[in-house]
Amino acid sequence: MNRRILAIDFGTKRIGLAVSDALGITAQGLPTLERTRLRDDLEHLGALAEEYAVERVLVGNPIGHGGGETSMSQRVAEFAEKLRQRLTCPVDLWDERLTSVEANRTLRESGISIAKRQRAVDRLAAVLLLQSYLDYVENERRRQVGASDEA
């Protein structure tokens, strides 16, 4: 069963990318996309979705810490809408409030150089975004199975 999901950490200069394994359990980072033109970016993402036969795309939504919309979350929503027009699978926004902070902290603690850290942070943010979604889906599945076992 192929339940691959493509995760996108949208940025104005780079797009971090990750894809799940075929079982939808783990997230693996893909090479970061250096932004060029919107049309080229969408074409590249469409090719990735096709290559990995993804059934869903998640776009990290950088909502404010209070849960409100930010100027960047508005840009992300517009980008996700353009992606929806291009792809045949669902494109969902997923709360990414802490993924970039966590990615930076993890990379800082790893001791790698600042230059390497800057190149890796977008990919790691996409991996963390996707893994949080996969964990959420699994926890919901377990909760539902537990509830049906009690019935």
Image (cartoon, helix red, strand yellow):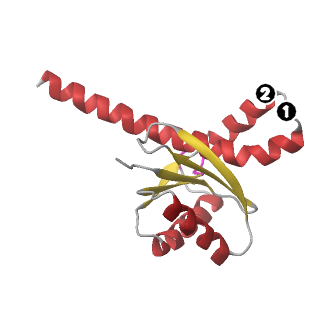
10 Å neighbourhood of mark 1: few (<14), some, or many (≥20)?
few
Q: State whether residue 8 appears in this view.
A: yes
Q: Which residue is mark 1?
A: 112
Q: What residue lies at 78% left-to-right and 27% top-to-bottom?
A: 110
As helix, strand or loop, the secondary structure at mark 1 comes to loop
Instruction: List x then y, in percent, for residue 130.
Output: 53, 44
Q: Is residue 46 left or right of residue 90?
A: right
Instruction: List x then y, in percent, for residue 132.
Output: 51, 38
Q: Which residue is mark 2?
A: 110
Q: What residue lies at 58% left-to-right and 42% top-to-bottom?
A: 28
Looking at the rendered structure, the number of numbered marks drawn on it comes to 2
Q: Quadrant of the C terminus?
A: top left
CB under 8 Å between callouts 2 and 1?
Answer: yes
Label 2, label 1: how many angstroms apart (C-alpha)? 6 Å
Q: Which residues are magenta?
A: 62-67
Instruction: List x then y, in percent, for residue 53.
Output: 45, 59
Q: What residue lies at 61% left-to-right and 66% top-to-bottom?
A: 75
Under mark 2, the amino acid is: Ser
Does residue 63 belong to the magenta stretch?
yes
Magenta span main SS: loop
Instruction: List x then y, in percent, for residue 12.
Output: 72, 63
Question: Residue 33 shows which numbered tag?
Answer: none
10 Å neighbourhood of mark 2: few (<14), some, or many (≥20)?
few
Q: Which one is in front, 86 or 143?
A: 86
Q: State whether residue 97 appears in this view.
A: no
Q: Is residue 134 left or right of residue 8?
A: left
As helix, strand or loop, the secondary structure at mark 2 comes to helix
Q: What residue lies at 74% left-to-right and 71% top-to-bottom?
A: 36
Does residue 88 belong to the magenta stretch?
no
Under mark 1, the amino acid is: Ile
Q: From what the image shows, is residue 67 above or below residue 54? A: above
